[in-house]
Image (cartoon, rainbow, N blue to C red):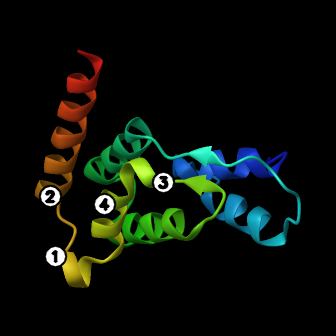
Amino acid sequence: MIKDKTAALHQILSYHDDWDDAIAYLLSSTEECDSIVASKPALILVLRKYVSGAISADDLEEWAGFIELTDDIDHSVIEDYLYALSNPELMGEITIDKVLQMIELLSDLASAVAR
């Protein structure tokens, strides 16, 4: 059960099982909240869901497009990846190999920053 807009945003960002309920909540909500940040680890989590078969390429494309268009989610850190995922007709279709490359790049970037 979704208790507020922030919780709905977090469920959408993580492509939680309650994705549809979270979308419906956002569409019907007029409440204000602080924006949340779409981080590299959050993106990796959703990419791994695709690799494992938990979500489809269409789901991943829809998710990326939604994150890009939602004002309440700051996606500036991962905007290039979201663009590629939400525009497969321009950037090439979403495949397991491409997503694995994204995960590797994101993981390498995260470890380089930690040093």
How dense is the environment of label 2, judged by Cα within 10 Å: few (below 14), some, or many (20 and up)? Answer: few
Q: Marks 4 and 1: in contact by CB < 8 Å?
A: no
Instruction: Determine the CA span between mark 4 and mark 3.
Output: 9 Å
Name the element at disc 2. helix
Q: Marks 3 and 1: in contact by CB < 8 Å?
A: no
- Between residue 106 and residue 53, name the one nearer to us: 106
Q: Which mark is residue 75?
A: 3
Q: Marks 2 and 4: in contact by CB < 8 Å?
A: no
Q: Which mark is residue 80?
A: 4
Q: Which residue is mark 2?
A: 98
Q: Marks 2 and 1: in contact by CB < 8 Å?
A: yes
The residue lying at 22 percent from left, 34 percent from top is: 109
How dense is the environment of label 1, judged by Cα within 10 Å: few (below 14), some, or many (20 and up)? Answer: few
Q: Earlier in the sequence, mark 1 or mark 3?
A: 3
Q: Which residue is mark 1?
A: 92
From the top left corner, tell me how far across and down residue 69 is, in percent.
Answer: 55, 71
Q: Earlier in the sequence, mark 1 or mark 2?
A: 1
